[in-house]
Image (cartoon, rainbow, N blue to C red):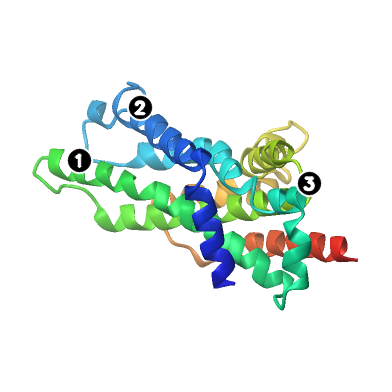
Amino acid sequence: MFSIFLKEINAFFSSFIGYVVIGTFLVIMGLMMFIFPDYSILNYKFATLDQLFNVAPMIFVFLIPAVTMRSLAEEQQTGTMELLVTRPISSWQIVLGKYFACLFLVAFALLPTLLYYWTVHELGSPKGNLDSGAIAGSYFGLLLLAAAFVSIGIFSSSLTKNQIVAFILATFLCFIFYWGFLFISNIPSFVGRIDAIIQMIGIDYHYESMSRGIIDTRDLLYFFSFITFFIFLTLTSLEWKRI
């Protein structure tokens, strides 16, 4: 599994697309956090990083599918998947190796955003006047959101040989599971009846509380169950193709 992890990391950074994806993410996030007036931390009268955790899901919907689209689709397209499955390595080792590699890349892309924390820390009056504990909890929630989206992206990549199709499918599924259930719950026939239950199925409901630094075991259970479910679907997809 570790060898596949290293292989994925090397393959990502040996291609131009890897730097483009991370660079694009940082540019967009920088514009949102410092330039666009509706989100700029410079326009807020108190020290907070709420803008970062509100904007990140919108960017993740496109960033993470771009990171995961080649993970299994390229292996199938080039025929190297057949070589992998014939080696003394199980399907779950292949999937988890690629999963953790993609998650590591997303976490790596998030590292420069710690500069925003330093900026707010220095600009606060008095200096350091912000809730560091809540921000740490919010970053943990953001990593769980990334982990959930990566599991969707890996699954989408296992279904097709075409990386563009994998990207589009993963983007669609990420959008549906994040915002789709919220929109469905607002349908008049559901409001006041089962709208709360429908919202709880979506990722947005559980991420919202964690983005405020609140760590709830119910939210943790949801994310871990969600990730496990999509990893299981990916394993099933690979096993089905082995037959």
* Amino acid type, mark 3: Thr
**Callouts 2 and 1 close, C-beta under 8 Å:** no
- Of badges 2 and 3, nearer the viewer stands 3
Q: CA distance from mark 1 to mark 3?
A: 43 Å
Residue pushed farthest bottom? 88
Q: Which residue is mark 3?
A: 160
Residue 102 falls in image quadrant:
bottom right
Can residue 37 be spotted in the picture?
Answer: yes
Q: Earlier in the sequence, mark 2 or mark 1?
A: 2
Residue type, numbered disc 1: Thr
Q: Is residue 38 left or right of residue 11?
A: left
Rounded to the nearest angstrom, the CA distance separating label 2 from label 3 is 34 Å
| Nearer-the-camera pick, 175 or 46 | 175
Label 2, on which residue? 31
- Screen quadrant of the C terminus: bottom right
* Foreground pick, 112 / 193: 112
Which three-letter amino acid code belongs to the residue tagged 2?
Leu
Q: Residue at x 82, y 66 (%)?
A: 239
The x and y percentages for residue 96 are 62, 67
User: Looking at the rendered structure, which numbered label has been put on residue 119?
Assistant: 1
x and y percent of residue 75 in the render?
71, 54
Q: Residue at x 75, y 59 (%)?
A: 81
